[in-house]
Image: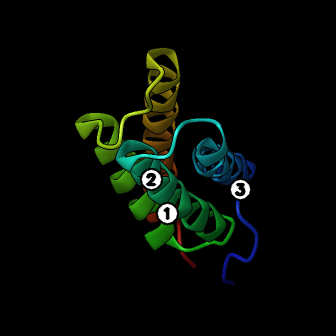
Amino acid sequence: MPVTSPPPLRIATATVVTAAGVAQVAMLWVFDLGAPVLLTALAGGCYVLLGLGLFGVSRFALALAAAVCGARAWLAFAPVPVPMWEQLRTAVDVLVAVTALGLLWQARHAPTH
């Protein structure tokens, strides 16, 4: 029988990624318009799409969440002009990447009948 509903941890991860994406897009109205803010908004748009994908049951969305959030945290591209917000953003990215990897591991090693 195929899995049709995602686990609660995946829903929570999807909610966090979507909220982070919306917050990054909303920075267009908070900071002066420039290249760093536009890159942050572009990354936020990708996060929103990724969050919407995480609300499903696909393993690909989990792998993509782990890769994108992990790479963003590791490489720190498109930094936010406020250091404290950048630290929060990096912490959320690490949390999402670790959670997505755990969910992917759990989905991959689930018993099949």
**Compared to 37, does 76 lie above or below?**
above
Q: Is residue 68 above or below residue 91?
A: below
Query: Amino acid type of disc 2?
Result: Leu
User: What residue sits 53% from the left and 54% below the top?
Assistant: 44
User: Mark 1 and mark 3 in contact (Cβ < 8 Å)?
Assistant: no
- Amino acid type of disc 1? Cys
**Foreground residue among 53 and 83:** 83
Task: Answer with mark 1 or mark 2, whichever residue precedes in sequence.
Answer: 2
Judged from the image, the secondary structure of the residue bearing numbered disc 3 is loop
Residue topped by disc 3: 7
Q: Judge whether residue 32 can be spotted in this image.
A: yes
Determine the residue positioned at 69% across, 46% down: 19
The percent position of residue 48, horizontal first and vertical second, equals 61, 61
Mark 1 or 2: in front is 2
Q: Which residue is mark 2?
A: 38
Task: Tell me where residue 70 appears, x and y as whole percent.
Answer: 34, 44
Mark 1 surroundings within 10 Å by alpha-carbon count, few (fewer than 14), some (14 through 19), many (20 or more) = some
According to the picture, the residue beneath numbered tag 1 turns out to be: 46
Mark 3 or 1: in front is 1
